[in-house]
Image: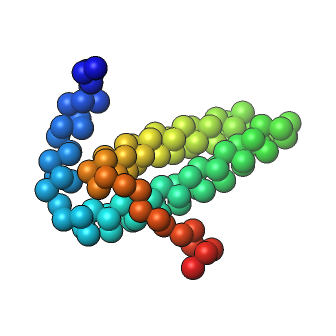
């Protein structure tokens, strides 16, 4: 089946940049992107938890709730873009490198 749609054009723009890289460079880039993805997820989770706690607190104003919701949504968009980038790097690399969690070092 043929891949059709807007994401195909975006992928074609980026893939040549990654496929022309050495595997060692790609692996280092992938490791860095995986660590960044983990940091983003942790930060997103913290904002989500704060938003959830505030939502359960009747003393929190609606403007504060809206600000927290907007922050969470903005972070989700950033995480989505970073995930797409990571996926393209991993596709070019051909495998997912083992990246221990920071606590495991």
Q: Give percent across and percent down for residue 61.
A: 75, 37
Quadrant into which the C terminus falls: bottom right
Type of colouring: rainbow
Q: Is residue 22 left or right of residue 65?
A: left
Q: Residue at x 77, y 37 (%)?
A: 55
Which is nearer the eye, 70 or 60?
Answer: 70
- Looking at the image, which residue is at 84% across and 40% down? 57
Residue 78 in picture, x, y percent from top left: 44, 45
Give the answer, above or below, for where 18 lies relative to 32. Answer: above
Along the horizontal axis of the image, is 99 left or right of 27? right
For residue 53, side relative to residue 83 (left or right): right
Residue most toward the bottom? 105
Pick the front one: 36 or 104: 104
Q: How many marks?
A: 0
**Front-lying residue, 53 or 5:** 5
Q: Residue at x 41, y 62 (%)?
A: 97
Residue placed at 23% from the left, 35% from the top? Answer: 10
Along the line of sight, the residue nearer the viewer: 38 or 87: 87
Q: Is residue 22 visible?
A: yes
Q: Position of residue 98 (x, y in %)?
A: 47, 65
Q: Residue 78, can we see it?
A: no
Q: Quadrant of the N terminus?
A: top left
**Side (left or right) of 38 relative to 48:** left
């Amino acid at each position: 089946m043929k891949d059709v749609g807007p994401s195909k054009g975006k992928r074609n723009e980026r893939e040549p940049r990654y496929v022309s890289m050495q595997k060692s460079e790609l692996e280092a880039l992938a490791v860095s992107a995986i660590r960044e993805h983990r940091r983003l997820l942790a930060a997103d989770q913290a904002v989500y938890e704060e938003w959830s706690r505030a939502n359960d607190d009747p003393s929190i104003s609606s403007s504060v709730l809206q600000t927290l919701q907007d922050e969470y949504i903005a972070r989700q968009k950033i995480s989505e873009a970073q995930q797409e980038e990571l996926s393209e790097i991993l596709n070019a690399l051909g495998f997912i490198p083992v990246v221990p969690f920071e606590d495991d070092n």
